[in-house]
Amino acid sequence: MTINVGGTYFLGVGSICRIAVAAAVLSAPLLAGGCTSTGNANSSAPTALAGPKDTGSYPNLNIRPQVAAKQLSKEETAARLGELKAEQQEQLAKGGGAKPAPNTAALNTLARTHGDDTLKQIEGKCDPALDPNCN
């Protein structure tokens, strides 16, 4: 379809791209406006847990960061391992040790016959409420 100017008014790839860009540019402030708020919804949150803050300067990587907890010395590590070993020995003395190996022959026999036995039990039982032919 043409008009007196001689231009074609069918939508081509270029026209669609220009329309999409224009729509994105015009709708971006509207979309961003929906994500902002003027009130402080979570005023009870502590500021230490609020997340990263822009301090306006780069971190100095030459300064060692503070450690979260004091590291254990070799003596403290050995003492705590000794305590754990003593508690382990107490548990073993109470009977909390390894269980005896199961009877594998009995388990193998059970595995071979369990399915057939269970099927016989299921087929032998019937519910008169569900099956009118049940005896």
Image: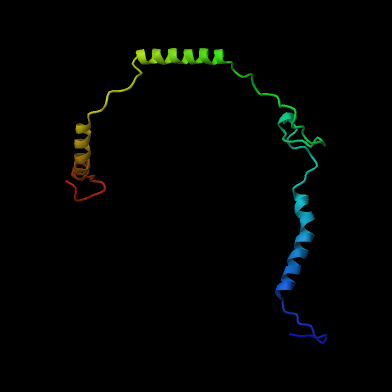
Which x, y percent locates residue 71?
A: 61, 19
**Farthest front residue?**
62
Which x, y percent locates residue 85?
A: 44, 15
The quarter holding residue 62 reads top right
Question: In the rendered view, does 17 fall on the left or right side of 112?
Answer: right
Residue at horizontal 55 percent and vertical 12 percent from the top: 75
Residue 75 or residue 82, whichever sits in front: 75
Residue 77 or residue 120, whichever sits in front: 77
Residue at horizontal 74 percent and vertical 37 percent from the top: 41
The quarter holding residue 9 reads bottom right
Which x, y percent locates residue 28?
A: 77, 56
**Farthest left residue?**
135
Question: In the rendered view, does 106 fall on the left or right side of 45?
Answer: left
Residue 31 vs 118, above or below: the answer is below
Residue at horizontal 20 percent and vertical 40 percent from the top: 112
Residue 96 or residue 44, whichever sits in front: 96
Q: Please name the colour scheme applied to the rendered image.
A: rainbow
Residue 4 vs 124, above or below: the answer is below
Which x, y percent locates residue 15?
A: 74, 73
Q: Quadrant of the N terminus?
A: bottom right
The quarter holding residue 11 reads bottom right
Question: In the rendered view, does 44 fall on the left or right side of 104?
Answer: right
The count of marks equals 0
